[in-house]
Image (cartoon, rainbow, N blue to C red):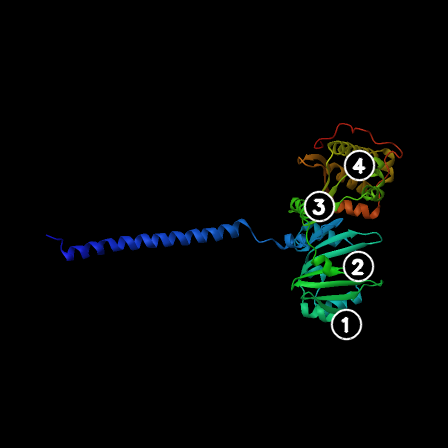
Amino acid sequence: MGQSPIKDIAAIEARAPMKQTRVWLAVSAAILIIAAFFAFRNWSVPSPSAREEMLSLMPDDASTVLFLDFAELRHAPFIAQLYAWTPQPQADPEYAQFVKDTGFDYERDLDRIAIAVEKRVQDSALFAIADGKFDRQKVSAFVLKDGTAAKTGGRELFSVPASGTTKKISFVFLQNNRIALTNDSNLAAFLDAQKRSKDAAEWHTRFERLAGSPLFAVIKQNAALGSTLAARAPGGLRSPQLSTLLDQLQWITIAGKPENDHLRIVAEGECLADATVRQLSDVMNGVLILAEGGLNDPQARQQLDPAMRNAYLDLLKSADISKIDRGDSKSVRLVFDLTAGFLEAARKAPSAPDTAPGKPLPRKAPAPRKGRT
């Protein structure tokens, strides 16, 4: 005797909820997987910051890149002290008119800027990216009073005469709050340049190391760098031997970070040769020791203002020299604190007294003070 049709229908209805449940579970799992995929992709590859975007636009063949984050620096106590200490320039009627016409005041409205310097045979070209609170319509109208505008590649390029020269400054709005400018005749060449992977990676590596610094300079070595720095150094810190070693570096970075009442400066010289790093470390330690000895000399005590002498000594005592081995490169790092007292002393006396003129630096520095390596 066959099974009742009523029982067959009842059995089918009993299985239907189970089948629907499995379907919904499968659909829900698929949705969760898709959502997780997009979330992971967005979280693991964060959008680049304004700083990273600016630095990525710097030309690979630059000799120097400078970066300043004014938005961060304005809130630093040391910078406020420095601004109050620095002699304020007299009001410039021309600049006051510029502020009135454009609504832009760099002291208030410039947020950050990255500047690349390209050395050429006869002169240097500057290329910069600036972020700030720009009134695009007002700025454009102001420029067109004395300058020109032209459409190129979908962009509106502005050109204005540079004061006191026959050259022109060209700029373009990349966004309402970002402009690119140069003193070169071909701004489009900077904007459209294709990045060479090796050079771009080398710059990017050093930018990443300086991510916590609101102001820095990255210098790709050139033969005259050591001589230039040596010529500008205070007398007590001048050394032909140091100059020669600096010329052997492939990269130099200088970064500053405000910390309460002082500015922490970190300078690093990088090369491939371990021997160069060892010699440079020894020479730098020797220079600091000789400079401190010169400041403690009885004659220096008599000639120098006590506050000035103490400011120089505080700078030397805060200095720390270390060596860094990154495997593929070796570095010497110098860290010291720049205080308002030192800046005041430097303003009164541009250079420190010479220490033992004509006395050669030791080939190997004496035993370093505590904190030096």
For numbered disc 2, what is the local secondary structure?
loop
CA distance for labels 1 and 4: 51 Å
- Relative placement, left or right, of 8 versus 196 is left
The amino acid on which the numbered mark 3 sits, given as a three-letter code, is Ala
Q: Nearer the viewer, mark 3 or mark 4?
A: 4
Q: Which mark is residue 57?
A: none
Q: Looking at this rendering, what residue extends furthest in the front direction?
A: 1
Q: Which residue is labeled 3 in the image?
A: 255
Q: Which mark is residue 145?
A: 1
In the rendered image, the quadrant that contains the C terminus is: top right
Residue 250 versus residue 84: which sits nearer the camera? 250
What x and y, as percent, mark residue 342?
Answer: 77, 44
What x and y, as percent, mark residue 242?
Answer: 81, 36
The amino acid on which the numbered mark 4 sits, given as a three-letter code, is Leu
CA distance for labels 3 and 2: 26 Å
Q: Which residue is labeled 2 in the image?
A: 89
The amino acid on which the numbered mark 1 sits, given as a three-letter code, is Lys
